[in-house]
Image: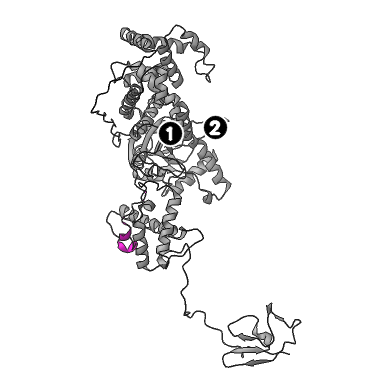
Amino acid sequence: MVQLSMSSDSDFELDTVDSFRDENQINGQFIRKGAKFNAKNNYAPRRLFGMKASEQPEEEDVTQKKVGRKSKRKVGESYSLYPPSQIAKFLQLIEEYPIIWDSSVDNSHRKELKMKVYDDIERECHHFIPRDKMPGKAARVLFEELSRDYRKHTLRIENSKSGSGTTESDFRFASNMEFWTGQDTSVSAYVLGQSAVQMLETRCDSPKRKMDVQITTPKRSRTRDGQIDHFFQKMESSTNSMLDALKTSLSDRSGECSSKRVCDSFEQQVVGWSEVDRIIAEAKEVVGVSDNVFGHLLTICNHGDSKCSAILRLAIFLKFCREGTSENALAKDVGLSQPTVNRIVARCIDDLVNAAPEYIRWPETKDEVRRMQNAFLNLQDPSGRSRNIPCFGLLDGKHWRCQHPPRTGSLNFNYKGFFSFNSLFVTDAEHRIIYIQMSELGVNSDAQMFRSGPLDTLLQKASEVAGVRKVPGSDTVMPSFILADNGFGLSKFVMTPYRENQLKSTKDIKYNEKISSVRVKVENLFGILVSKFQVFNRELRLDPKRSRALIISCCVIHNISIGAPSPPVVSDDEEVIIDPYKCAESQRTALKNHLLRV
């Protein structure tokens, strides 16, 4: 039998335990005979001691505020739980370390240095910031949340025309975070597509070095000087002789051995040529352009040193782009000095960039948009069936690997882990480039460049000009739009696939497959550019401005190689259709239903 005695302080004493099998254990808790239990302890239900429910002591009110030491903050808790004075002190310490928030600071891309700084801030704020197993994690998470809300606050202010509803109360620490500009600013070096929005980066002619003391050195003898002089004399006598020879050699080629540098038939054509003539023909052959394209490029790259003919300059430039060798190696190959090769490459780049607005053009009329839509509608899958997607362009971003530009810190260090220039491309169904936006930075994402550039405005104008049309062979009506990946937001002008968390049925998966099968052509464009111009297979080693101009010039050569688009067919008077879709999601659903019915 259990005997209990109650004292004044609500403590119970256990005298004997006869009703339990094990006298040394009650409800899993080991006790001694005569041990005292407090009412707060729940070692065993009190009904085990033979007490009635009315005799049970009253339970303590858990809602009452406990007096004692304050609980510590946990890692990942919102900054709203901290006193404002502590957050202000935390932001003041963050401002003192620009390596955290300023990408232009050297080594700001190194995470281990940032975590060390975060750890130092945690030590200074140890009385209110918790410590985690990973030093610096709590401070990093806290600042990321603050910066995220500050970015939303600044976007609301920018998007608001009247400024109403964007007072200081939206984000109370806005004044403390004015030092942080974020990474949303995208500096565009080139914007090509429409004359109204085009932007060309200024040329970067490096100043000539001046020497106080003139040092004369004997000229080195070159084994190819006689051949170069012979070539100059030949070009002065007849400019068209080399073009005729190249045209004859290329027209007689069988085209069987594309993997070789120079095939056997080409070797037979150039048996009697001098070495310089062979270099020119080889450079033209390696770049893979036809004789018409080579002659067209000659009309563009016709400004340069009078000591070197336009044919030789263009051939050297094409050899530089195609083979991707250094200027020193190229100079040894063609028998010229490295400064001469550098000057030839720079002037050819400038000539092509100045002519870029004529060859990279955005559709401005209704007939041009209709022609591009019909080209996508006529695309076929491997089985010969029409893909029937009524878009007029494909959008995607591309990072061009480069060396670390001087005095830029980590502004060109991208999320992939290398230094680059980011860019946006829009292409048509024939891999023709119709829009380029080249950024000076590499840290910007594709969506940030899209928001900061004029592409959204161009898409809206193209949609207004082309209007809404009925898809041929279907009752579905669809406005003009382009395809992009999930890195860009869904809008009525940009259709994207469903995200992984939005896939609800097999229809959504099939829709993604059909969209991706067409959108892959913009990825093919990047593969064509890199395979055709081997200079992109390594880091761009030219000056940063010259490197960006080199990308534009190679895109111009690519568009000239494809040829001019066919003239648009003048469309008949179409029926004016009002856009039936109120939002982008309903338009995507209609496009999905149309593709799955085909």
Residue in front for this viewpoint, 367 or 152: 152
Which of 162/73 is in front?
73
Q: Quick one: quadrant of the N terminus?
A: bottom right
Q: In the rendered structure, does residue 163 fall within the stretch colored magenta? A: yes
Query: Please, is residue 377 above or below residue 277 in the view?
Result: below
Whichever of callouts 2 and 1 sits on the residue coming sooner in the sequence is 2
Name the residue tied to disc 1: 539
Give how far across and how far down residue 592 sits, in percent.
51, 43
Q: Main secondary structure of the magenta part?
A: loop
Q: How is the image coloured?
A: one colour
Element at label 2: loop
Q: Quadrant of the C terminus?
A: top right
| Residue holding disc 2 | 381
Image coordinates for residue 345, horizontal then vertical, percent: 35, 24
For label 2, count other residues whose C-alpha is less than 10 Å away and answer few (under 14), some (14-19) or many (20+).
few
Visible in this render: residue 42?
yes
Q: Secondary structure at mark 1?
A: loop
Residue 50 part of the magenta segment: no
User: Few, some or many C-alpha atoms within 10 Å of disc 1 (few <14, some 14-19, many ≥20)?
Assistant: some
Q: Residue furthest right?
A: 21
495 up-or-down from 527: above or below: below
Of marks 2 and 1, the one in the foreground: 1
CA gap between label 2 and label 1 equals 36 Å
Q: Quadrant of residue 462?
A: top left
Q: Residue at x 49, y 62 (%)?
A: 132
Q: Position of residue 580 (x, y in %)?
A: 41, 46
Above or below residue 379? Residue 169 is below
Which segment did they paint magenta?
A: 162-183
Of the pair 49 and 396, the residue shown nearer to us = 49
What residue type is disc 1 on? Glu
Q: Is residue 361 visible?
A: no
**Please, what is the three-letter code of the amino acid marked with disc 2?**
Asp
